[in-house]
Image (cartoon, rainbow, N blue to C red):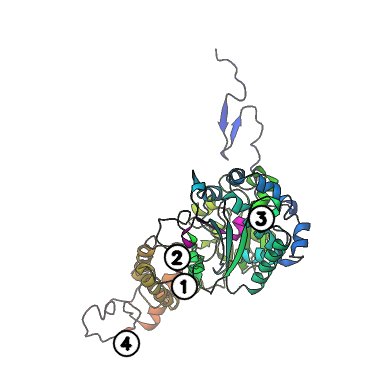
Amino acid sequence: MLKASSSSSIALRSASGHLRTFATAVDPPVRRYGGLKDQDRIFTNAYCRHDHGLKGAKSRGDWHRTKDILLKGDSWIIQQIKDSGLRGRGGAGFPSGLKWSFMNKPNWQEDKRPRYLVVNADEGEPGTCKDREILRGDPHKLVEGCLVAGRGMNANAAYIYIRGEFVQEANHLNQAIAEAYKDGLLGPNACGSGYSFDVYVHRGAGAYICGEETALIESIEGKQGKPRLKPPFPADVGLFGCPTTVANVETVAVAPTICRRGAPWFAGFGRARNQGTKLFCISGHVNNPCVVEEEMSIPLRELIEKHCGGVRGGWDNLLGIIPGGCSVPVLPIKDCETVLMDYDSLKDAQSGLGTGAVIVMDKSTDIIAAIARFSSFYKHESCGQCTPCREGTTWMMNMMDRMVEGRGHRREIDMLLELTKQVEGRTICALGDAAAWPIQGLMRHFRPEVEARIDAFRSKHGNVAFGGRLASEVDDTLAVPDNLGVRLPVDAPGTV
C-alpha cells in the first residue's frame, strides 16, 4: 500500500513553470517587475530640478558616512559590488565586481606603478542621454563613486573623460570636484580615511570612437583615438602604461549607494543575472520623452506607457522600437508586447539592452531611411584602422542609401547581409558589430518593406544594374560586369 506523502515530497510543475505541490490551491503569483518606488531611486535630481552642488547633494544622502565605506577596505567594497549583481551600464553588461577585481591580483602591492580609474563619460551614441543627466544633476554621485570605486581597486586617481560637447555638464562636474576638494572629501586623506585620491577631468573632442575604452585611453595620452589590440588588457597595461579600469558613469555612480544600503537591497530588483535599477532614456514617437530610473526587467510596453504616456497615436500605431541605442537591432511590435528590459530577455529577442536608450518609431517612420541614417553615422565615426570596418561601413552606407530609394535588386539584400557578416566580429573594437546589427535587424523583421520598395522602383524605372545604375545609364554593349544586372528581367513579387 502506498504511504501518504507530505505536500513537499510530491510536486507538479504548473503551466506557468512554477513548482506546485498537491497542497497548493493556486499557482504562486508571477513576479512582476517595474514600479520602482521613489525611496528606492538612486538618482533623485533628474533634469537638475534641485541644487546640484555639495549642499544639495548632502541633503539627498550623498557623502553620508563615506569614510566608513573607505575604511572597510578594498575586498569588502569589491565583494559588495559582486554580491549586488551590478553589470556594466555602458552597453557590454560585464559583471562590474569581477572587472574591478582584476587590478587586485595577488601581490599587487609589489607593483610600484600608479593605478588609475578612468570613467567613460563620452556619451555620443544617438538616442543615449542618461549619463548626461547624471553629470548635470547628480555630479557628486559620480565624484563619490570615483572615490569608492577607486578604493575598491586601490587606484591613486580617476580621470573622467567627458564628451567635448557637454559644456554645462563639464562645468557642473568641475564645480563638484572643487567643492569636494575644499571640503576634504578628495585629495590627501580623503574623507579623513587616510586614503589619498585625486580626480581629474579630461575633455573629449567629438570622436565617437573614443567611447571605446582603449581609444579613450589613447586620447587621454594625447594620441589619436584609435582602439588598441588586446591583450594586453587595460588592467595590466592601461593609461600611461599603468594598471587601469575603465567604467561607465552610471556604473561608478551607483557604487556608494550599493555599499551604504547593502548588496542584497540592490540585488532584490530585477531578475537573476539582471539585478538592480537602471536609467532608461526614451525618445522618439512617445507623448512624453524622458529619462527615468526604473527596475531592471520591467516590461518594455509598461516602461513606455507608464513613464512616457504611451506611443503617439496609441500602441497599435507602433512600428518598432530600438531598445538599447542605435547599435542594437530593432524590434517589431509583436516582440515589444512581451519583452523585458534586461540583458537576457532582449538577447533572446535577438536585440540588446545596450545603453538603455529606447527609440520608439510609429507607423509614420520610414524604417529603411532610419537605419540608413545609422549606417551614415557609423561610416562617419569609423576611425579607419581596421579594413573590414573602414571599407565595410562605406559599402553598407552606400547600399542602404540605395535601399531607401529602392534602387537595386532583391538579391542585393542578401549581398548586404553577407557584407554585414564580413564586418561583424572582424575588427579590433565593437564599432563594426554596431554598424552591422541595425541592418541585420531591419532585414530580419522588415525585409518585405525593403523588397516592396525595390519592386516599386523597378516597375517605374525599369531594369537596374547591380550598384544602382539604371539601364538607360549603362551601355548595354559593355561586357559583364559593367552591365551586370541590366539584362535581368524586372523583378516580379516573390522573385529575385
Relative to residue 86, is residue 138 drawn left or right?
A: right
Residue 40 percent location from the top left of the image: 71, 51
Q: Are marks 1 and 2 in contact (CB under 8 Å)?
A: yes
Between the residue at mark 3 and the residue at mark 1, the CA separation in whole angstroms equals: 31 Å
Sort mark 1 into few (<14), some (14-19) or many (20+) by Cα contacts within 10 Å.
some
- Residue 216, compared with residue 21, is above or below; it is below
Residue 286: quadrant of the picture: bottom right
Pointers 1 and 4 in contact (C-beta within 8 Å)? no
Query: Is residue 33 placed above or below 205 in the rendered structure?
Result: above
Q: Which residue is mark 2?
A: 431
Along the viewing direction, whichever of 132 and 400 lies nearer the viewer: 132
User: Which sits in the foreground, 7 or 125?
Assistant: 125
Which residue is found at the position 61% from the left and 56% from the top? Answer: 252
Give yes or no for residue 183 being in the magenta stretch: no
Marks 1 and 2, how far apart at CA: 9 Å
Instruction: Give the distance between the C-alpha atoms of the residues marked 2 and 4, in whole angstroms.
Output: 36 Å
How busy is the neighbourhood of tag 3: few (under 14 within 10 Å), some, or many (20 plus)?
Answer: many
Q: Find residue 232 and report its horizontal and vertical position in percent.
A: 41, 56
